[in-house]
Amino acid sequence: MKSILITGGAGFIGSHLVRLFVKKYPDYQIVNLDKLTYAGNLMNLKDIEQSANYVFEKGDIVDSELVNKLFEKYAFDSVIHLAAETHVDRSISDPLSFVKTNVLGTFNLLNAARMHWKDSTGKLFYHVSTDEVYGALKLGEDTLFTEHTPYDPRSPYSAAKASSDHFVRAYWHTYDLPVVLSNCSNNYGSYQFPEKLIPLFINNIKNNKALPVYGDGLYTRDWLWVEDHARAIDVVFHKGKQGETYNIGGHNEWTNMDLVHLLCDTADQELGRAAGTARASITFVKDRPGHDRRYAIDASKIEKDLGWTPSIRFEEGLLETVKWYLNNEAWLDNVTSGAYQDYYTKQYT
Ligand code: NAD
Ligand code: DAU
């Protein structure tokens, strides 16, 4: 049985990936290591937590002793590393937490893999990263981030992710550690913590609260359905070439204003409210410091080399997402009240 460590599996993308792997690969043992920060929610995995091939370990990747003990206990063949501090606004107010988890945590995992994988046959360290490491593109231009775009991180979050990417590549070149990386654009879908644009705005619309658009609202992101990202990770993990990087994106650029308008109209319709109700709550607020103007991914390498493509149109995915948050009131209430943080103690201790 292949033993795979997935870090950050209680988070947004991690929970989709854990679910995909647990269901699709009954012959793999999936060990989910997660610190359960504010962003970690075991309720995201309620439907698969009893599966025979799934184990949860609560712990911090910054704790090197714990990471080494887990490598001894489970003899991992592979690591898929997602655990990170991920919210750009939080990285501006508390950059140190981002250095600790994203840089030191990644470094600890690399060292543990290096120490325990004396024979690296059949082993793989996969780092799941972000397009934000490439910096910012200009609005109105049709340039895209490729795998060769020079790194130019602008926020403490992206600087920490860029640093961890560099360590992963350094371990490949210096110690022959078998690695692969992917850099993905903005994900959306179910189980995302409602501090990020889409779930925050759905929750605010539901509760008749203001919708705070940063700056002029013309910032542009390339949105990808989270389940398409999980499928892409599956493909890179099984078919990606060692030492390589794969950009993942939706070919789906939206200015924040256009996206927010579509979200408002979709939510009004689903809530049975008059057209224009949600749009009336849009409020322009102070801009995010160092706000990156535009992200857009050239995903042709993963498409050509590994045969992956996004599966769903944005309008359809956004409708599904709005429906999911409105129909999963208990999940949203547990998250916004903080009750989800008791789930581990109740179910696992
Ligand atoms: P998230 O914030 O929803 O989840 C992060 C998870 O990591 C949480 O479960 C949290 O408890 C855990 N964690 C945090 N610090 C930890 C630590 N020290 N030890 C162990 N666990 C810890 O994040 P996400 O949006 O699902 O992102 C997952 C990964 O994908 C990150 O590495 C992120 O950089 C990358 N990524 C995210 C996006 C996106 O749009 N969300 C896009 C591209 C790449
Ligand atoms: O590009 C990939 C990245 O996408 C990931 O690496 C990050 O982990 C993830 O958080 C995301 O970063 P962004 O900063 O792009 O996502 P966020 O949802 O915070 O913001 C999306 C856009 O919306 C951005 O231009 C800022 C803007 N925004 C965000 C919030 C929360 C607002 O205008 N108002 C808001 O309240």
Image (spheres, rainbow, N blue to C red):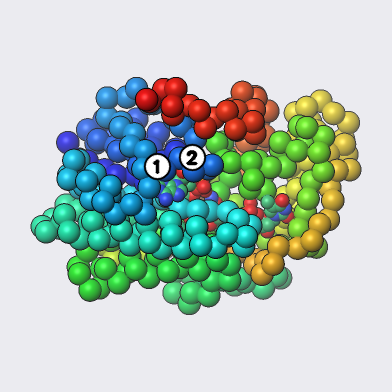
The reply to whether residue 244 is visible in this rendering is no
Check disc 2 and report the residue beneath it.
40
Which quadrant holds the C terminus?
top left
Q: Residue furthest left?
A: 119
In the image, the residue with mark 1 has its CB under 8 Å from the nearest atom of ligand 1: yes
Q: Is residue 258 left or right of residue 138?
A: right
Vertical relation: 304 (above or below) 176: above
Residue at image point 58% right, 45% down: 188
Query: Which element carries disc 2, helix, strand or loop?
Result: loop
Residue at image point 30% right, 58% down: 108
Residue at image point 20% right, 69% down: 175
Where is residue 178? Give x, y as percent.
Answer: 23, 61
Is there a contact, CB below 8 Å, between mark 1 and mark 2?
yes
Check disc 1 and report the residue beneath it.
34
In the image, the residue with mark 2 has its CB under 8 Å from the nearest atom of ligand 1: yes
Closer to us: 254 or 189: 189
